[in-house]
Amino acid sequence: MLLPPTDAKIVARRAEIVAALKAIVPGGVVADPSGLATFDADALGAYHQMPLVCVLPTNRQQVSEILKYAQANGVPIVPRGAGTSLSGGALPREDGILIGMGRMKRILEIDYENGCVVVEPGVTNLNITKAVEANGFYYAPDPSSQIACTIGGNVAENSGGLHCLKYGLTTNNLLGVTLVLPGGEIVTLGGKCGAQGGLDLLGIVTGSEGLLGVVVEVVVKILRKPPVTRTLLASFDSVPAAGQCVAAIIAAGVVPAAMEFMDRRCAEAVEGYNQPGYPAGAEAILIIDADGVEADVTHAVFSITEIVAQCGGTTIEATDEKQRTRIWSGRKAAFAAMGRLAPDMICMDGTIPRHALPQVLEEIAKLADHYRLGFCNVFHAGDGNLHPLIIFDTMKDDEFERAEAFGADILRLCVKVGGVLSGEHGIGVEKRDLMTDQFSEADLEQQHRLKCAFDAQGLFNPGKVFPTLSACVEQGHIHVHGAQLPHPHLPRY
Amino acid sequence: MTKVANEDQLVEFVRAARDVRSPFEIVAGGTRRSVGKPVGEIPMLDVSGLSGVIKYEPAELIITAGPATPVAEIKAVLAEKGQRLGFDPADWSRLLGSNGAATLAGAASSDASGSGKLRHGGARDSLLGFRAVNGLGEAFRGGAKVVKNVTGFDLPKLVCGAFGTLCVLTEMTFRVYPQPQLSTTLCMADVTPEEGFAALRKIALSALEPVGLAYLPANMLADGGKGAALIKLEGAQQPLEEKIALAHGLLGNAIHPIEGDLFTAIGCGEKFADIPGDIWRVMIPRAEAPRIAMELHARHWLGDLAGAVLWLAADPAEGARIREIAAKANGQAMLLRGSAESRAALGLFAPQAPVLAALSKAVKAAFDPLSLFNPGRI
């Protein structure tokens, strides 16, 4: 994976840039190599890069000043929350300022009557729920990194989680943000009432992967905790039977709070790891949560159990909280269990139409043979979000290259069957070069022009999301024909 | 008026308009032409031919259709499989005094989300993907045809509520939801706005997943006493009975079921269809509803979405005052129906602050740099 070439002129000005940032954020600039090493990667662990400098502002005025300085001096900016991105969204640049939002972590207001919480971007996802759970409320999106990931990062990545099918992604649970634009101007999009009075820029900023600005305040919706949650474990002799079961549950009008699929490889790995008690020999298992008022849940559990039986599966219901936790412990340990089988692992993330599941799993198995690598499949089955885990050893010959190629082929496969490159992890650097598999040049040019509307100088998170390094130019009526890319003299990386 | 029947014809039409810089108005069902600033005497592009279901996959919870497909047609197709659109697309044609059929693109482009927004969000939360032609005459795609997708910018959000000012849609893919077997509307009659909205907020903050929460003052509902809070719940029989019992537990026994579904009429603004004057939708934080309703002091008004949207009729001279009240509450006042003079003077929304206005303009230019589509509408 290549990043845009480093601008040596910026690197040469490092001392001056550090001094300028220290003047803006006294005591909040990390410039020594050991300190910077903390920030040299996010959760896409294969890629490391020391930033030019890292600045940790504590308020929006500082953010604004930093961005004004960066723009005036043509210095790239990479925003970072907690650095839990799985797609390299917060991977630093040697010639760029890393702006870490972790110190802006105040909960500014809890407003039950309006069903919302106002927070700074560095508040962790879980801390929002913790702030309101004593009163019976929670914040719905629950990415697996929720203990560490920040709400600002969630906004940037439009993070999901286990409960998206019923409760939506970040974008569906967000009422407003305050954003500092690349030029340092501060704008508020939406707010407690959600309405924006014009174009839905909030919708564009959400999931924009740090390409459009820095979020300095967030208003999220909170929901009443469902009074009842019940958990079912269903096992099947074949993957198509499990796939058919998922489709039948959805078609019956049941919307489970969560519906997780694990293939045999994954179930066996976790059984050998923390013994969640999954039935031996099952080719596929589903873990299903139903939540809501009691009768709703009873109704859902009854329907699901019947459908599982019709599809040739067997259902076990957790009888108490302890068993619920045990059933879920296997799913939650999938990464750790697979990680035990090899030194390195990557977690892929694509979405497919659910009906394509048996075909996709069969082809993934063939690809694994081709690349001679171990893998397993976990899947947010309700919304078609597939997470194949590929295990390998970087120290062994070309295993890393093979693992990356295997992962890329899986994502191409997702696109081929009508799906997408990313269901919740984002594009970042990880999937950047695959964007042309999903989008035409016209599609990407349209998105790039939108990027330019926010960031005409192209200073925000360069090298992420878009596969082509192109400058923002005055957009006129000149049409780009056929296969000719804009600015053909610029390199592709 | 030119009529296009497919994307190729549309591309050709837009390129021709681009080459001579000739702006035009995009019309499908034509029911919402009188919303927003008048676009003036410019040619019309009739896209009503881009109609019909393209692919419906109930088990994938998605439907793909032409943008000019009538909402009624989509609803009927979905109902056959026990599904529905989550955002309750509102048909404003009676309110606006227009004929024609409300279409998918019209509903999404004008963010005409009804009471279902409480549970499933607005049009923006349901539109998963689209195809369109931009102002350069290029066909492009935004979003995708799966329910969970974070690949690239989330363009479907932007298209919703843009009133056709960014691109001309040629295909739309929506997420759909199961249609529960039963629903009921409960009425808490003879309550003041203060009491009524407080009751609605209690339900909004519960786990009952309401799909309608409105307050109607005395002159908006017969038998409502001094005003009535209306609550719509749904589910299969037993769950619905449980929800009704829980609602009684939260609000006491002053609530009783009433006949009919008033919420469709509320979302469509039908209560205001026969009332003269400008019609506004004022969007505010819902807890402010009683105070702001009092301050707005309209003879005809009601509160939808637990108070987050106040509908009201007002004299054209009241526009500036309404906008001021909304702004003070960090809300937005949308002029939904007004004379051409009112709309020209007041616009659809209040002018944005300079930085936001400049950004919005740049975003518009990123799609339609020559301002060909519905110029000046928002």
Image (spheres, grey):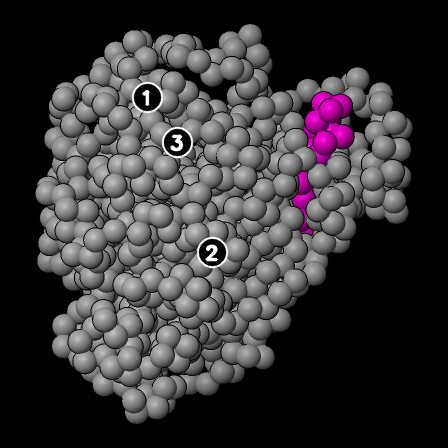
In the rendered structure, the answer to whether residue B109 lies left or right of residue B293 reads left
Q: Name the residue under label 1.
A: B372
User: With A71 as the anchor, is A264 left or right in this view?
Assistant: left
Residue sitting nearer the eye, B221 or B68: B221
Is residue A4 at least partly visible in the picture? yes
Give the residue pinned by disc 2.
B325
| Label number found at residue B94 | none
For the magenta stretch, what is the residue range? A67-89
Near-viewer residue (A368 or B261): B261
Q: What element carries label 3?
A: helix
Q: Mark 3 points at which residue?
A: A438
Circle 1: element type: loop
Q: Alpha-carbon distance for marks 3 and 2?
A: 46 Å
Q: Do labels 2 and 1 share a chain?
A: yes
Label 3 close to label 1 by CB (< 8 Å):
no
State which chain disc 1 sits on.
B
Marks 3 and 1, how far apart in space?
Answer: 28 Å
Instruction: Describe the element under mark 2 as helix, strand or loop.
Output: helix
Q: In this view, does B54 lie above or below A327?
A: above
- Residue at 12% x, 31% y: name it: B49
Q: Quadrant of residue A237?
A: bottom left
